[in-house]
Image (spheres, rainbow, N blue to C red):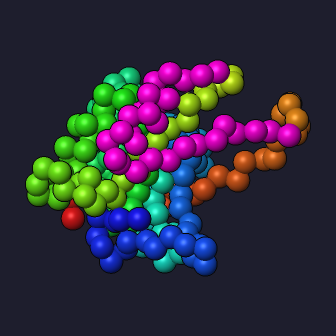
Amino acid sequence: VCAPNPVHDLELGAQNVVLTTSGEAVKILDYETQTYRPTRLVDLYDAARLADRMEHIHNYGQPFIAAEWSHDVYIHDMNIAYAALSGTEKAFALGIAVVDHIDPLIALFDTYLGREGAFLERPFCAFGGCPIVSPLRFGKENAEVLVKVPMSRSPHKRARPHRHLSPGPSSKPSPKPWPVWPSSTAYDPAPR
């Protein structure tokens, strides 16, 4: 698996264990206020920076959405890609909502690499999504992403729908929120 920085390329095999982040939550526990709030783009950037520094996290998977951009899915998808690229030198995966966003994202990554076609030669981002959406129905837009990605020879991931053992709030364990570390730095849009 390629990474933006070849130092972080991954060799997959029977004896190798690779750990990644993943998710796409819409709320996060704010460490300072101890309340849940909608996730923001800067949270994605901070999570990518954190994963980049963690020795035993080998791949960064988008852990939540940028809720402030959920009204414009194109802007959302382009910005989450830029936040990941700015925050980590490791391989990463993104949940892309609309098939028409794949080519502009590939162009963004080509620009980062310095020439057209460079990303498909050394793809460091896996695009994906879950074709099953709640409540257990077919998500046409996400399925179109999963069909397009292999056609472009870009890596992809396929998410499985979440399953609960039994219905009802009493059957679900209490969520253990991941703390958001107070960010001492503002979002830096300049890629490394």
Taking the image as shown, residue 35 lies to the left or right of residue 60, namely right
Whether residue 134 is visible, yes or no, is yes
Question: Residue 118: where, in percent of width, then height?
Answer: 19, 56
* Residue at position x 44%, y 28% in the image: 144
Instruction: Decide: is 60 above or below 155.
Output: below
* Residue at position x 70%, y 39% in the image: 162
Taking the image as shown, residue 116 lies to the left or right of residue 140, namely left
Question: Residue 33: where, in percent of width, then height?
Answer: 55, 48
Q: Which residues are magenta?
A: 137-165
Question: Residue 46: where, in percent of width, then height?
Answer: 40, 57
Instruction: Decide: is 137 above or below 54.
Output: above
Taking the image as shown, residue 134 lies to the left or right of residue 111, namely right
Instruction: Decide: is 50 above or below 190.
Output: below
Taking the image as shown, residue 124 lies to the left or right of residue 61, namely left
| Residue 95 figure quarter | top left
* Residue at position x 48%, y 30% in the image: 142
Front residue of this view, candidates 95 and 184: 95
